[in-house]
Image (tube, helix red, strand yellow):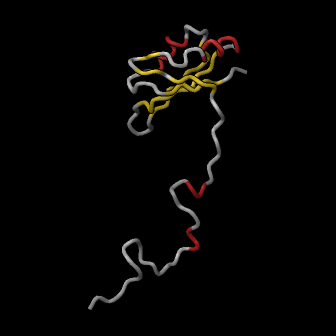
Amino acid sequence: MAKRLFIGNLPYSTTAQDLEQLFAQAGTVASMTLITDKFSGQSKGFAFAEMSSDEEFENALKLNGHELDGRQIVVNEARPREERPQSDRFGGGNRDNRDRRSGGGFGGAKRNRW
């Protein structure tokens, strides 16, 4: 199975086709995925690629530091995504232990002003 490459520090104007052309210098590109914002469609400045063989993978790693549109790209072996705890997803924490009388973020419980 081919190893995955992480390609970072990309100019936002870079397309998947641009990357495929660049990495074709190292060998056959099995897949190229440019990561984009799901709402705007704009590039997030990084991508993942797979090369067809281990030798081509090693050749692709040599593109680390290559200049692309004025930026030095970063090329590393991709690492598996780390699992994040569910409670941290929205900066939450344990909501059950919260004082229910706190009245939100603007001072304590509601009180009569008059």
What's the residue at 62%, 12% (across, down)? 59
What's the residue at 47%, 81% (across, down)? 101
The quarter of the image holding the N terminus is top right
Q: Is residue 59 above or below residue 76?
A: above
Q: Position of residue 44 (x, y in %)?
A: 45, 33
Q: Position of residue 48 (x, y in %)?
A: 56, 26
What's the residue at 52%, 24% (across, down)? 74
Relative depth, front residue between 9 and 36: 9
Q: Position of residue 92 (x, y in %)?
A: 53, 61
Q: Is residue 112 above or below residue 37?
A: below
Q: Is residue 96 above or below residue 53?
A: below
Q: Which quadrant of the view contains residue 49? A: top right
Image label count: 0
Relative depth, front residue between 39 and 26: 26
What's the residue at 55%, 9% (across, down)? 24
Q: Which residue sits furthest right?
A: 1
Q: Is residue 89 left or right of residue 80?
A: left
Q: Which quadrant of the view contains residue 27? A: top right
Q: Which residue sits furthest left?
A: 114
Q: Is residue 37 left or right of residue 93?
A: left
The quarter of the image holding the C terminus is bottom left
Q: Position of residue 20 (x, y in %)?
A: 51, 15
